[in-house]
Image (tube, rainbow, N blue to C red):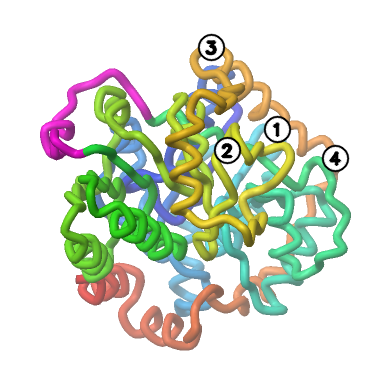
Amino acid sequence: MKTYIFFTRRFINIGGSEQYLYNKKNFLERQGWRVLIFSGQHGSILINDFKRFERYIYTELYCVPSCFPRKTVEKVINRIVSDIGDCKGEDCVVESVYLPSCIWAEMVASRIKARHLAFPLQERHVYDEEAKKYLWFKYNRHELAGIARDSVRQMLGDDSLELRDDLKISTFGNNVFDDCDDPYTKLLDEKADYSFASIGRLVKPCVPAIVEGFCSYARNHPDKRFNVVMIGDSIKKGRKESIRKKLSRVSNIHTVMPGDVYPIPRSFASKIDVFVSTAGAATATYIERYPTVKVNPLNGDPVGVTGLDYMPKEKNMYASSPDLSIEKCIDNAIFNRDKIRFVRGNGNEYISRMNTEFQRQLSFLDFTDKKDYYDAKLLIQIKQSNTRFPWLHSFLGHILGGDGYEKFRKYIGK
């Protein structure tokens, strides 16, 4: 049987990457693939179908292999290979969706002689030279892609890079709404004049700007009452409380913070006048035909109202619009709602486009048929990226091990 193996940082809680993995897993299984998902973090599994992969959580996968002793790395790889079992290279594909996952996946793919597609799904890519050398290797083999046109340019640090069609993937992680039980509508202030909401992990760098945009709008309309709903959670408890505190300082805002919600009841979402989010969360509300302000994921600068002054095919989510503010975009979405072009469909059309995209991603395997892998001795030297203190991750990983380091992270998060 053909086997497709995902390596990801986590499949707990809910976000665009988790929904993407779920959708693609379902697509592959319908095509007759056996699917396995390996991840690096324990927690609340909101997508019930992922619970069968809970035994494939190896906490070491959360960080790059260099964070752990070589003997530990070898032990983890041996256990993963054993979990995979009989897998002929010709019928086995590995996909990774986060840089540490990409490195572990490359080492496992080399061991079982499988093809490896590296699709880091992050919105921000800052890597050191050793990591870039590895990513250049994957780029040259047509085995590297990201979620935006500029993603691979960010990964490689080369703004002049040719934008090939195979450098961008669509994740189709937007079908998070359902006609289900709704325990959330009752949390809203029924007397509010308007209700605003944002969807996404609260640790995203764009969140402070979104919160400030809501606060500023409410302060500028003291005669109105507002519901502000922040759907999402954070392992850093201080982040959630700081957001709540900031919103509570504005007297005409009623704050609702339900945490992670999956699926999101349509009856609840229909009570929201304007959503302000980024990336896939903004696409999700737009395809459900809710007025949506999209913001830059890195700094929260507004890109525009989707379907009004922002169309995905004309601008990407990193686009800059210096003349815009979140407050102006909210006004635009409210008072020009009838002019918004909701051109993206859901239902059968969405599923059809999603299946076509997932099939296109499989076609990347046709670009190079020769199996080749990055030198394992170089992979083991790549440091933890997107952090100010990579040495600290290595130190803690060597001292505490994967499980101990996970407990430490959770303790610090509290």
Q: Position of residue 54 (x, y in %)?
A: 31, 44
Q: Which residues are magenta?
A: 177-192
Q: Earlier in the sequence, mark 3 or mark 4?
A: 3
Query: Is residue 197 at least partly visible in the picture?
Result: yes
Specify whether residue 234 is painted magenta: no
Q: Position of residue 9 (x, y in %)?
A: 45, 56
Instruction: Decide: is 219 above or below 45.
Output: below
Which residue is at a point 60% across and 54% down the rendered structure image? 120
The residue tagged with tag 4: helix, strand or loop? loop
Q: Quadrant of the N terminus?
A: top right
Disc 3 marks which residue? 348
Specify whether residue 184 is painted magenta: yes
Magenta span: chief secondary structure: loop
Disc 1 marks which residue? 362
Disc 4 marks which residue? 367
Which residue is at a point 70% across and 35% down the rendered structure image? 361
Amino acid under label 4?
Phe
Amino acid under label 3?
Asn
Report the Cα–Cα distance between label 4 and label 2: 21 Å
Which one is in front in this view, the residue at disc 2 or the one at disc 1?
2
Q: Quadrant of residue 150?
A: bottom right
Amino acid under label 2?
Thr
Report the Cα–Cα distance between label 1 and label 4: 10 Å
Q: Earlier in the sequence, mark 4 or mark 2?
A: 2
Which one is in front in this view, the residue at disc 4 or the one at disc 2?
2
Which residue is at a point 66% across and 78% down the rendered structure image? 128
83 and 152: which is toward the camera: 152
